[in-house]
Image (spheres, grey):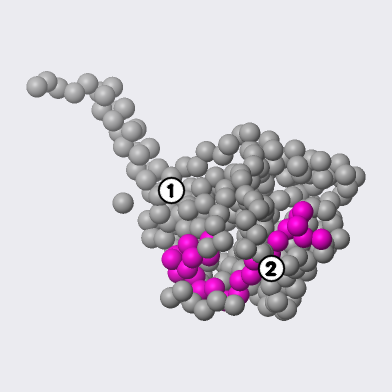
Amino acid sequence: MKARRSGSGGTSPTLLVVGAVVVFVFGFTLGRIPSQDPDNMAADLAPKAMEKNQPAQPCVPQPCVTIEEDPVKQRCEMDYWEAVSKREHGTMGNTHYKKIYTDFFGIDATFYDGKKFLDVGCGPRGSLEWAKTSVERVCVDPLARKYGLLGADAHDMVYVQAGVEEMPFPDNSFDVIASINNLDHVTNADMAMDELARVLRPGGTLLLIVEVHARPTMCEPRTFAWTLTDQLVARGFVVEKEWHTETSPKCTNCTRRPCGTHSVVSCDTFDVSDPTPRNGFIGARLTKA
């Protein structure tokens, strides 16, 4: 448990007619541009962004820097999920997610009642279908449209195609954000953490599980120090609970191999006295101040 770490001649009739048309069209178009008031912009853009499996709208309310997703990394991610789908005969299950979002963090399921719930980098399984009492269940993922080919269109939740670095939501949009085994997959971790802080409302909860890699991989290009949550504290978060665990191959307690996300509840505390290069996991529950 950690405490708070605390930008000269006449004009021809033809030209006059053309000019009048240009002025009319420009005036009509200008009248349709959303107000620059952030609340009005949110009202105009949010419904579009919430359509299932649609591309993200421009970042609101502030200008954004476009992130180019690495197509090789995206292919790596899709290869993984296509293999999972094939292994599970095209019907990828999602019943295990409720335990991740409750037991893993010491939270009762009723905590999510009436809340706006966002999962970043959720994958195609339908990670939030279990949270029936949440008023909004949204996944943002740069592969959201492709997930429709794996059955995501049938899920009782909303998928929005966007990276966590550039989410098409107004400030303070969500009560709970989950980043489960996602932050090590992003293109720009600093931008991702800025966006998590922006779209979570004050007093909202961030649930974080992230793998700490000894070295980057094609699908997981980001590596972090065990002090990762310090960067979130610097962005206005308070750490309510944090723990670090071993994972495969040193962990022998988990029933599945490799242990993956389950390491945060199945494996022992990471042994920092052992200098052997290996992966581990950070689990944390944070509140936005």
Point 28% across, 30% down: residue? 19
- In percent of width and height, residue 33 lies at 41, 49
Q: Which residue is at the front of the view, 40 or 161?
A: 161
Instruction: Specify the quadrant that holds the N terminus.
Output: bottom right
Q: Is residue 45 visible?
A: no
Amino acid under label 2? Answer: Thr
Point 37% across, 56% down: residue? 36
- In percent of width and height, residue 169 lies at 52, 57
Q: Is residue 246 above or below residue 77?
A: below
What is the span of residues highlighted in magenta in the rendered image?
228-252
Sort mark 2 into few (<14), some (14-19) or many (20+) by Cα contacts within 10 Å. some
Sort mark 1 into few (<14), some (14-19) or many (20+) by Cα contacts within 10 Å. few
| Residue assigned mark 2 | 269
| Residue assigned mark 1 | 64
Instruction: Report the side of 171 relative to 35 (left or right).
Output: right
Q: In this view, does 29 lie above or below 95?
A: above
Point 14% across, 22% down: residue? 10
Instruction: Report the side of 56 relative to 102 (left or right).
Output: left
Amino acid under label 1? Answer: Cys
Q: Which residue is at the front of the view, 104 or 168?
A: 104
Q: Quadrant of residue 219?
A: top right
Q: In this view, does 239 lie above or below 36?
A: below
Query: What number is the disc on residue 96?
Result: none
Q: Is residue 249 visible?
A: yes
- In percent of width and height, residue 84 lies at 82, 45
- In percent of width and height, residue 37 lies at 38, 60
